[in-house]
Image (cartoon, grey):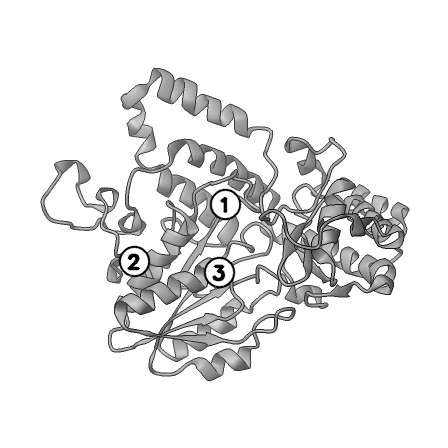
Amino acid sequence: MHLTRAAAEALDDADPLAGFRDRFAGVDDGLLYLDGNSLGRMPRDTPAALARVAEEEWGRGLVGSWAGWIDVGTRVGDVIGTGVLGARPGEVLLANTTTVDLYELVVAAADARPGRDVLVCCADDFPTDRYVVAGIAAARGMTVREVPADVDEGLDPADLAAALDERVAVVVLSAVAYRSGALADVPAVTAAARDAGALVVWDLSHAAGAVELDLAAHGVDLAVGCTYKYLNGGPGAPAFLYVRRELQESLRQPIWGWFGQRDQFAMGPVYDPVPGIGRFATGTPPVLAAAAVEVGARLVAEARTGRLAAKGRALTGLLVDLADAHLAPHGVALASPRDAARRGSHVTLAHPHAWQLTQALVDRGVVPDFRTPDRVRLGPAPLYTRFVDVWDAVDRFRAILEDGGWSAHPEERTRVT
């Protein structure tokens, strides 16, 4: 691949997804935003969608609007499920946070495997996943079996296979590693766990909207994920949970809320969950936030995840090539899988002064992310990031390394990222 800026511009000219960029706010402000895997940009249609719900449905419709709000979790869940995740209608629910959804599904799955006392997770997985698993194990007298993972290359399937036996009830794993972007083999891992008699709960937070997923075809049992990254649902947007249709009637989640109750307005004395995905609902759905999530999810569905995944591989491939050519001579090392087929849509680079470099990049109009211990994470979201954005970001990164601009920043972290 030619590594000139003109070559990057040519890739943008040929990009079939190029038109989606103009459907996001702030793309022409000169900022090189490479943190879409933390918080996605705002779609231009989102303010109008929020205003419609706030001004018309809430402001004028008041309580009469509940007829259209009551099923918002399943309605927007279907947009995400069928348009983004490769799920069937009635398998995805928009509700709660990723942490709460994960808790619900892990407990439900553990209850569905009586006599098994081990929960498996990845030692390098996102903290909330490990904390939830540890908390459930402590409360239930179970054992946590943490599988080691290479911080750059991700989970070795052989290590996971060695952790699976007749004691394992539930396996919790991320489809895309939050730190390195390493992509797990979802169908293979799911099949291996099933062969061992365990259920897998997949965390799709860094995957949904960035890599191609086909949960139904791959026989995935359970999954959760956030909507504020590649789905562009906005800060604090509610999460989604997925339960394979064939499992829904046999699982009972631990948070018995009235929105999961059969004939909920009868206000009955005994909890009797509704059939289907609705039994995983708890309390009142986040109506305003769901409106924003729906806008972002429909954009992803329109773009089609196969095309998004292909562009994500091309963007990160260009980033890796440019880093090899211009950053590696200055001590920057690739901290993600080199093979594009084994990456999600972000690339992580290691350097002893990663925290200072991250702050210097922000000063020069590039927004990356810092991850411990010494990583700069760059997430070019394929819906709105151009190839020339990647080229310019690496060029500014190179200039900072050459002129020593990073050294003006404190070595210790002064804020949370």
Do labels 2 and 3 touch, CB within 8 Å?
A: no
Q: Amino acid at mark 3?
A: Pro
Q: How far apart are labels 1 and 2 at the CA level? A: 22 Å
Which residue, as the protein is rendered here, is positioned at the far left?
Answer: 269
Per the image, label 1 sits on a secondary structure element best described as loop
Do labels 1 and 2 touch, CB within 8 Å?
A: no
Which label lies toward us, 1 or 2? 1
Residue receiving disc 3: 127
Question: Looking at the rendered structure, which numbered label has been put on residue 248?
Answer: 2
Q: Earlier in the sequence, mark 1 or mark 2?
A: 1
Residue receiving disc 1: 227
Q: Amino acid at mark 1?
A: Thr
Please say whether residue 15 is visible from this viewpoint. no
Q: How far apart are labels 1 and 3 at the CA level? A: 18 Å
Per the image, label 3 sits on a secondary structure element best described as helix
Q: Which image quadrant for residue 363?
A: top right
Q: Position of residue 389 (x, y in %)?
A: 77, 44
Q: Residues within 10 Å of mark 1 (few under 14, many from 20)?
A: many
Q: Earlier in the sequence, mark 1 or mark 3?
A: 3
